[in-house]
Amino acid sequence: MKKPNLKKPSKVELARTRLDGAVARLEEALDRRLDSLPDAAGKPPAETPPALVEELESLRDENAKLKGLNEIITTRLDAAIGRLKTAIGN
C-alpha cells in the first residue's frame, strides 16, 4: 500500500502565511484607526464629544502660536550667531 504524497509546507511558505496574516491584521487596524480620525477638512468625526473637539481646537491654536514663536526665535538666534561670528572674525 502506497502512502499518500502529503507535502509538508516549507519554512518559507509558513513564514509567508504568517506575514500575510500580520499584514491583513495591520490593514484592519489601520482602517479602524482611519475611521476614527478627522476628515480631510480637519474636522473630527460627528460622534466626537464636544469637550474633545474644543480641546483639539485649543491645541491647534496653541500649536500655531508655538510655531510662530519658534520662527521668531530662530530669526533672532540666526542674527545673534551672525553678530558673534562677525565679532570674532569668522
Image: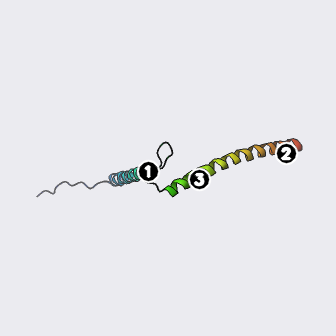
What numbered label is drawn on residue 77? Answer: none
User: Where is mark 2, residue-wise?
Assistant: 84
Could you tell whether 79 is left or right of 54 in the image? right
Lower position in the chain sequence, tag 1 or tag 3: 1
Where residue 20 appears, x then y in whole percent? 35, 51
Residue name at image x 77 percent, y 46 percent: 77
Residue name at image x 13 percent, y 56 percent: 2
| Residue density around tag 3, few if under 14, some if 14–19, many if 20 or more, within 10 Å | few
User: Where is mark 3, residue-wise?
Assistant: 58
Query: What distance separates the C-alpha of mark 3 from that of mark 2?
Result: 39 Å
Residue name at image x 51 percent, y 53 percent: 53
- Type of amino acid under label 3: Ser
Where residue 39 appears, x then y in whole percent? 46, 45
**Is disc 3 placed on a helix, strand or loop?**
helix
| Residue density around tag 1, few if under 14, some if 14–19, many if 20 or more, within 10 Å | few
User: Where is mark 1, residue-wise?
Assistant: 46
In which quadrant of the rendered view does residue 72 lie?
Answer: top right
Could you tell whether 71 is left or right of 87 in the image? left
Of tags 2 and 1, which is closer to the observer?
Answer: 1
